[in-house]
Structures are given as C-alpha cells and as structure tokens.
Image: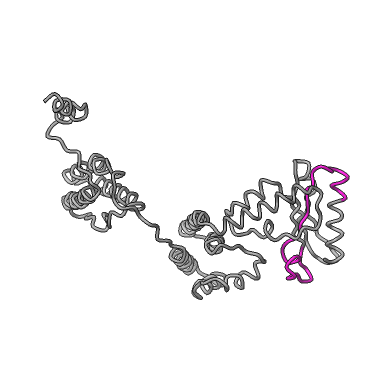
Amino acid sequence: MNNVNQKIIDAIIAKAEKECPDSLALIGVYGSVATGDEYAKSDLDLLILILDENGWKLGTGFILDDSDVGYDIYCTDWNGLRSDAQCHHAQLSKLMDSKIVYVKKQEAYEELCRLRQQAKEFLASEQRFDRVDKLIDKAKEFFANAHLHKELGQVRLDVFGVMYYLLDAVMLYHGTYFKRGVKRTFEELAVLPLEESFINNMKKITISKGISELRDLAKNLLLYVENHTRREQPKAEPSEGLAGTYEEIYSNWRNKVEEAASNQDTFASFMNMCNLHYMFSEIASETNIGNYNIMGAYQPDDLEANVQIFDEYLKKYEQVYQKAGLRVQKYSDVDAFVADYLGEEMEHRKEK
C-alpha cells in the first residue's frame, strides 16, 4: 500500500479515536488497491464498518490536487453488510474480499467472517435463482422504459439499466460475483459459459448512436439471459390439490365469454379469455396439466368461436380432473346441491 493510502487510513483511525471511539469496528481495503490492479490515479476503496450513528461522521469526500485523484471515504453499517450477504446483487467484493487492515472490535471481525460464509453458502444454493429472477424483472422494467422514452440520452440510460441488472443476474446464476472493477468486466465474464454474442451485444450498445438499435440490442441481451438462466422446474402430477379449480374457471369466465359473444363485446371477450389463460398458466407453473394457449387460439373477429375455444379447453381440463381422481361438481338443480352440501343424502343413506 502506498504512503498516501496509509496516511488516509491512519487519519480515519485517529479521527475515530478522537470523535467517536466506540463507533469504528474495523477497516478493510478492497478494489484495485487490494487486487494489485491499481494505476497512477486509482482511488482507495475502503470498508469502514461502523457500529452506530456517530460513526457516519468518519465519511467524507475530497480531491488531492498534487495527484488529481478523488477519494470517497464511505462508511458501512451492519445493515449494509447483512443486505450484501443476502446477495441481492453481484457487487459483493466489499463484503467478500476486503483485506482487513485494522480491527478495533474483534467480535465485529468474527461477525464479518460469519456473513462472508453466509454469502458463500447462498451463492452455492438454489435460493440464488430467486435473486436472478428478480434481477431479470428489474432489467425488464428498464427495457420497458427504453421503449417509452424518446430522447437518445434517456434511452441510453435505460439500456444501461438493462445491462446492469442482467450482468448481476448472470453472475449470481453461476454462483459468483464481480471481484474487480468495470474495466475487467469482460475478463470476469470470459470464464463463464456465455456465448460471444452476449458480450458483443454489450459492446455494440456502448457505440450505438440510434434509439432503435439500442432497443434491439437490449432486447437481444434480455432474451439471451432469460434463455441462459431458464431452469426446468419439476412439476407435480395432477392431484386432489386441483379440486375446485375447474368450477372456479367455469364460474368466473365461462358465461361472461358467452355473454360477450351475444353482445359482440370484443373487449369483454378479450379480457375474460386472457384471465382464463392466466389461470391455466398459474396452475401449469406447478402442475403437469399440458399446454393451454388460450390467447393463441383467441378469435377477435369471431366471438362465438371464443365460446367454443373456452369449452374445448374446459373439456381438456376435465380430463386432467379425471386423472387426478376428481369429478366436476355438477348438480341438476340447487336443491340437489343443497342436499349434498348439507350432507342430507348421506344421512338419508345411513337411515336406510
């Protein structure tokens, strides 16, 4: 470590002893200084772990004229480190790789080691895939904004958001995180089983001058990462857990689709058929019921046909019910339902 960096660290320790002696827990160094990747104008990345509100006064920012280097002396509390240990992102080097150069509270160092182990175990677990899905969802939000905005600079920022979250998603999917700076991003990606097109599309974004091209490149990135991180989830076979779903589908939308056809109400037909599609998709996400592409079959110019499509899929789903050992709850009239609902038929049989 060079003399300037050491003086900065010593100054932080001295200030803590003078103004908040119970606030500073430890100091670590990460980033280019720790990895040996520094150059003449590298700043100093520090983990300054504080224990209370008074510790925030240790933070500051400044520029040294003699070297023309800016420094951001930023403090971190336990909430920040514990959040990092839950791996909501792939920027984990501060937590995982900081070289500890000063320890005031030994118990704090031991807790840091525990959090590092927690993060390591999380990265090796299937729980990380939930984080991956959330990061992809965030990328989709920025992708949507890239299509809503019309100014080139703003679209560039939106596409940056797509890139940022997809990079984190890819790293977490492979159980790792970024250990070095932005300039080493492609080197870190190179060790992962990624297609060259993914890297090339990122590079093309940085030189793109057109909104349409930026949107297309962002779409390619998003589709690639979705496909790359897709996991086939085991699905249960149809069982008694499906009980009531057929009846719910019939009750919620069947007659509404028929009414929409009678009234030539395309909006109502569309909305109810979409709801049907989503219901089947929700069931199919966990249970092996087959394919129910309602909106692929939807007929905007023939609303009567949509009633037939609805009934065809209901008939198909009734076969799933049968496979699960279920029967559709149908009654000849309301009296028959009430008798069954109240168990009167059962009681009558017992009397006989």
Q: Quadrant of the N terminus?
A: bottom right
**Nearer to us in this view, 19 or 247:** 247
In the rendered structure, the answer to whether residue 342 lies left or right of residue 2 reads left
Q: Which residues are magenta?
A: 14-43
Q: How many numbered marks, from 0 up?
A: 0
In this rendering, the answer to whether 342 lies above or below 286 is: above
Q: Quadrant of the C terminus?
A: top left
Residue 149 visible somewhere in the drawing: no
**Nearer to us in this view, 135 or 71:** 135
- Measuring from the top left, give residue 4's x and y in whole percent: 85, 63
In this rendering, the answer to whether 269 lies above or below 220 is: above
- Measuring from the top left, give residue 309's x and y in whole percent: 19, 53
- Measuring from the top left, give residue 317's x and y in whole percent: 23, 50
In the rendered structure, the answer to whether residue 144 lies left or right of residue 306 reads right
**Residue projecting furthest to the top:** 351
Residue 7 visible somewhere in the drawing: yes
Please report the residue visible at 61 percent of the width from the left and 70 percent of the height from the top.
188
How has the structure been colored for display? one colour
**Nearer to us in this view, 203 or 241:** 241
The image quarter in which residue 234 lies = bottom left
Find out whether residue 26 is within the magenta segment.
yes
Find out whether residue 226 is within the magenta segment.
no
Please report the residue visible at 18 percent of the width from the left and 44 percent of the height from the top.
258
In the rendered structure, the answer to whether residue 341 lies left or right of residue 164 reads left
In the rendered structure, the answer to whether residue 23 lies left or right of residue 170 reads right
- Measuring from the top left, give residue 69's x and y in whole percent: 79, 64
In this rendering, the answer to whether 92 lies above or below 22 is: below
Please report the residue visible at 20 percent of the width from the left and 43 percent of the height from the top.
327
In this rendering, the answer to whether 47 lies above or below 197 is: above
